[in-house]
Image: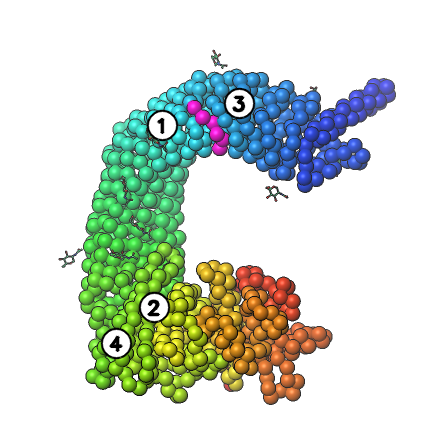
Amino acid sequence: MATIFPTPLISFFLSLIIFTTASETDLLLTFKTSISDPLNSLSIWSNTSQTHFCNWTGITCTKSPPSVQTLNLQNLNLSGEISPSICQLPNLSNLNLANNFFNQLIPLRLSQCTSLQTLNLSNNLLWGTIPDQVSHFSSLKVLDLSKNHLQGQIPHTLASLKSLQVLNLANNWFSGKLPSSVFGNLSELLLLDLSENPFLMSEIPQELGKLETVQQILLQRSNFYGGIPSSFVGLLGLEVLDLSQNNLTGTIPLGLGLGLGKLISLDISQNKLSGSFPTDICLGKGLINLSLHTNFFTGLMPDSLEKCLNLERIQVQNNGFSGDFPYGLWTLPKLKLIRAENNRFSGEIPSSISMAAQLEQIQIDNNSFTGRIPQGLGLISSMYRFSASLNGFYGDLPNNFCDSPVMSIINLSHNSLSGRIPEIKKCRKLVSLSLADNSFTGNIPVSLSELPVLTYIDLSNNNLSGEIPLGLQNLKLALFNVSFNRLSGSVPFSLISGLPASFLQGNPDLCGPGLPNLCTNEVPKKRSVRPTGLICALVSIAFVVGFMIVAAGLFVMCRSSHNKSFSGNWKSVSFYPLRVTQQDLFMGMDERNIVGRGAFGNVYIIHLPSGEFIAVKKLVNVGSLSSKALKTEMKILAKVRHKNMAKLLGFCFSDESIFLIYEYVHNGSLGDMLYGSDFSLEWSIRLQIAMGIARGLAYLHKDYVPRLLHRNIKSNNILLDMDFEPKITDFGLDRIVGESLYQSSMASELNPYYYMAPEHGCSKKATEQMDVYSFGVVLLELITGRKVEEPESVDYVDVVKWVRRKINMINGAYQVLDPKISNSSQQEMLGALEIALRCTSVMPEKRPTMFEVIRLLQSLESKPCPLTGFSISN
Ligand SMILES: *[C@@H]1O[C@H](CO)[C@@H](O)[C@H](O)[C@H]1NC(C)=O
Ligand SMILES: *[C@@H]1O[C@H](CO)[C@@H](O)[C@H](O)[C@H]1NC(C)=O
Ligand SMILES: *[C@@H]1O[C@H](CO)[C@@H](O)[C@H](O)[C@H]1NC(C)=O
Ligand SMILES: *[C@@H]1O[C@H](CO)[C@@H](O)[C@H](O)[C@H]1NC(C)=O
Ligand SMILES: *[C@@H]1O[C@H](CO)[C@@H](O)[C@H](O)[C@H]1NC(C)=O
Ligand SMILES: *[C@@H]1O[C@H](CO)[C@@H](O)[C@H](O)[C@H]1NC(C)=O
Ligand SMILES: *[C@@H]1O[C@H](CO)[C@@H](O)[C@H](O)[C@H]1NC(C)=O
Ligand SMILES: *[C@@H]1O[C@H](CO)[C@@H](O)[C@H](O)[C@H]1NC(C)=O
Ligand SMILES: *[C@@H]1O[C@H](CO)[C@@H](O)[C@H](O)[C@H]1NC(C)=O
Ligand SMILES: *[C@@H]1O[C@H](CO)[C@@H](O)[C@H](O)[C@H]1NC(C)=O
C-alpha cells in the first residue's frame, strides 16, 4: 500500500508526528516544573529519558498520532501550582489530580482546555469560592471538586455546564442557599452529590425534579430543611436517593413510590419527616387488596405489581412517620435491607414476606407494629438480623423463626409474645438472642447450648420456668440475663461463677452458691461448727456488659475475730459470688493439698463443702503494701478478664500472708504434664496451647489497662482446662509483694532461671521482650517435648542451648522435634521452631511482639485443627 504514496508525502507525515511529539513533551515538562513531587513519582518525566512521553507515569495517549489524552496523577502527594500549560495539549480530555495536596484556588484557567471533559480535583486543599467564570468549562462532562475546603455560595452559572453528567461538590464548606435555577438546565446530569456540606442552609430546590435522567442524588448531612419536593415524583431514572441526616420536615410526597421503578436505594433516615407513607408506594394503584390475596394463596406476584422491583435498601429510621408501613414493601424480590426503627409505624408483617427472598436485615424496633411473627419470615434463608423490639407483636413464635442459616441477631424484646420458646437448631451463627420482657412460658430451650457462637442471651422478664440447662455453661457467654422469671433448681456452676448474680435475680426458686438459697444437696455438713459471723458476705461485681466484660469492684470486708487458730486480723474480698469461708481456706491449707511450691509460697487445691474446687496461692513473705494499696493492686489483677488468663476469684489477707483464690482448672499445669513420664499431647493441641498463651500475654501487654507484664512465664504457670485451653496464672505478683521482694524471691528460685531472658541479669527494668523470651522457652518445650532442663541427661544444658546446638548440625532441625509426634505435623512444627527461635533471640529487639507471634502461629495453621483430644502412649 505504501507505494501508492510518493515518498516525500510519507516523510512529511513523519516530520509532523515528530513535531507534535516534541511539543507535547515540552508542555508536560513545563507543567512538571511548577509541581512539587516529594515521592519523585514523575522522575521518568524528563528530556533525557529515552522513554516516549506516552509511557510516562500517569499518561495515556490517543492511538495515532500518539497524543496525550488522559493525565492521571492521583495519589502522588503532589503539591505546587497546576499550570494551565497543559491546556495546549490538543487532545487532553481527562485530568485527574485527586488525592494530592494542591493548596490553591480552583484553577480556572484550565477552562481553556477546550477538549477537557473530565476534571477531578477531589481530595486536595482547594479553597475559595467557585467564581462565576466556572461557566467557561463549557465542555465538561465530569466535575469532581469533592473533599476540599471550597466556600461561599454555589453559583448560578453552573447552569451553563450543559453537558455535565457528574457534579460532585460533596464534603466542602459551601454555605447559603442552593440556586434553584441551576438544576433545571443540567439536563444530562446522572449524578449530583452535595452531601456533607454542613454550612449549607437551604431547602431542596423543586427544580431538582426536572433532572429526568438523573440516577443518583446524594444530599445527606448537608443541613437541608423544608420538605421533600413533590417534583421528585418525576425522577423516573432515579436509582439512589440519599437525603439522610438533614433537617427535613413534612410528609413524603404523594405518589413518590409510583414513578421510582428503577430505585435501588432510598435513605431518608434521621430527619424530622412525619405523616404516613403513601400506602400505594411500590404497588400499582388499587392493587393492595388484590396482591394480598394473590400472595397468600399462590405466592405469585401479580403482573401489575411492577413498581420498586429493583429496590434493595430502604432506610426511613429515626423520623416521626406513622400509619401503616406500606404493605408492598414487605414483598419486594430484591429487597435486602429495611430500616424503620424509631418511628410510629403500625401494621403487620405479612406472611408473604417470604417473597422478599433476599432480605438480610429488618430493623423495626420502637414502633407500633402488631400481629404475629409470621411463618414466612423463617423461610428467608439470607436473613441475618431481625430486630423488632419495643412493638406490639403478640402470639407464639413460629417454630422456624430462627431457621435462616446465617441469622445472627434476633431482638424481640419488649413485645407481648407468649407461649413456649421453640427449640432453635438451624441458625448456627446466632450471636445474640433477646426475648426479654415478653410473656414466654415453659423451659429455656436446651438447644441453645448447641449454638456455637451464641454470646448474648437475654430472656429476662418473662414467665419461664424449669431449670437452667446445664449445657449453657459450654457457651462463651458475655451476657446471660434470666432475671425475673420463675426458674428453679441449681444454677450451672460456670454460669454462677462467670457472670454477675444480678442476671439471676428475681427467680426465688433458683439455688446455688452465691444465691440466697443453697441447693439442698450442697448444704455443708459441719455447718454447726462454724461461727456464723465468719461467713463472708457474698459479693458480686457489677458488670458492664456489651460484648466485653469489664468489672468494677464492690468490696465488702469481713473479719474473723472468733477463730483462735489463726491469729491476726483477717480480711477478705471476693470478686465473684463464691461461698467460701476463711475456715474453709484454713482447713484446706494442708500439706496433702499442695500442688505446687514456688518462690512466693505454695499452691493448694481446696475442695469446698459445696463441692466446688478452688486453687489458693498462699503468699507468705508479703511486702509492705498498705491494705488500701493492696486492695487497689488486687482490683487491677482481678479485672484481668481473658479466656487465657486464670480468674482471680478473691483474696484474704492478714498482716503476715495473703491468700489468692483462683478458679480451679481441671487438667493441672503444662509443667506437670511435661514432667510426667507419658507426655504425648498431639501437635494440634500443643499449637492450640501455644496460641492461647500468646493471646493471654498479648492481652496483658497491649489490651489491658494498665498494661501488665507477667514476668514469670513458665510451664508451671500455665494451667490447662478440660479442653486444654491454657490459662495463665501467677501474673502481676510483683505488684502485690513489691519490686524488691519480688526480685529477691525470684533470685532464690532456680528453675525460672532458664525461662529468663539473658538480659535479665544486667537490666533493671522488666520488659515485654523478657516475657516474649519466656514464652519462646515454653514453645520450645512444646516442640521438643523436653523439659526446660534435664538434670539426668549427660549433655546437661537447658532446652534453649540444646536446641541451638542441635540445629547447627545437618538435619538438626528435624532432630529437635518431639519424636512422639507423627511426621505429618513436621512442617508446622518446623514453622513453630522458627518462631520459638526468634522469641528466644539473644537480642531483645529481634524478638517479635506477642501480637506478631499470634499472627505467625496463625499462619502455621494450614487447616483448622479440630479438637480430637489427646493420646497417651503406652
Ligand atoms: C511504550 O512502551 C512499550 C513497551 O514498554 C512499547 O512497546 C511502546 O511502543 C511504547 N509506546 C510508545 C508510544 O513509545
Ligand atoms: C503522602 O502523604 C500522607 C499525608 O501526609 C502521608 O501519610 C503519606 O505517608 C505520604 N505518602 C508517602 C508515600 O510518603
Ligand atoms: C487531536 O487533536 C487534533 C487537533 O485538535 C485533532 O485534529 C485530532 O483529531 C485529535 N485526535 C484525536 C484522536 O482526538
Ligand atoms: C475522582 O478521583 C477519586 C480518587 O481516585 C475517585 O474516588 C472519584 O471517583 C473520582 N471522581 C469521579 C467523578 O470519577
Ligand atoms: C437555562 O436554560 C434556560 C432555557 O433553556 C435559559 O433561558 C437560561 O438562560 C439557562 N440558564 C443558564 C444560566 O444558562
Ligand atoms: C433543624 O432546624 C431547627 C429549626 O428549624 C434548628 O433549630 C436546628 O438547629 C436544625 N438542626 C440542624 C441539625 O440543622
Ligand atoms: C422510640 O422512638 C421515639 C420517637 O418515635 C423516640 O423519641 C424514643 O427515644 C425511642 N425510644 C427508644 C428506646 O429508642
Ligand atoms: C434489644 O432491644 C432493646 C430495646 O430496643 C435494646 O435496649 C437492646 O440493647 C437490644 N439488644 C441488643 C442485643 O441489641
Ligand atoms: C406469669 O404467669 C403468672 C401466672 O401464670 C401470671 O399471673 C403473670 O401475669 C405472668 N407474668 C407475665 C409477665 O406474663
Ligand atoms: C437484666 O434484666 C433485668 C430485667 O429486665 C434488667 O433490669 C437488668 O438491667 C438486666 N441486666 C443487664 C446487664 O442487661
**Which residue is at a point 47% across and 27% down the rendered structure image?**
174
Residue 69 image offset from top left, x and y in percent: 67, 27
Does the residue at mark 4 contact the one at mark 1 (Cβ under 8 Å)? Answer: no
Residue 273: mark: none
User: Is 484 positioned to the left or the right of 862 in the image?
Assistant: left
Give the labeled residue for mark 1.
225
Q: Give the distance between the C-alpha atoms of the residues marked 4 and 1, in whole angstroms.
A: 65 Å
Q: Name the residue under label 4.
A: 535
Q: Does the residue labelled 1 lie within 8 Å of ligand 6?
A: yes
- Judging depth in this view, the residue of 217 and 674 nearest the camera is 674
Q: Can residue 74 be seen in this view?
A: yes
The secondary structure that most of the magenta stretch takes on is: loop
Determine which of the numbered discs, if any, sits on residue 575 in the image.
2
- In 3D space, how far apart are the residues under numbered discs 1 and 2 (Cα atoms)? 53 Å
Q: Distance between the residues labelled 3 and 2?
A: 64 Å
Q: What residue type is labelled 2?
A: Phe
Residue extent of the magenta highlight:
171-176
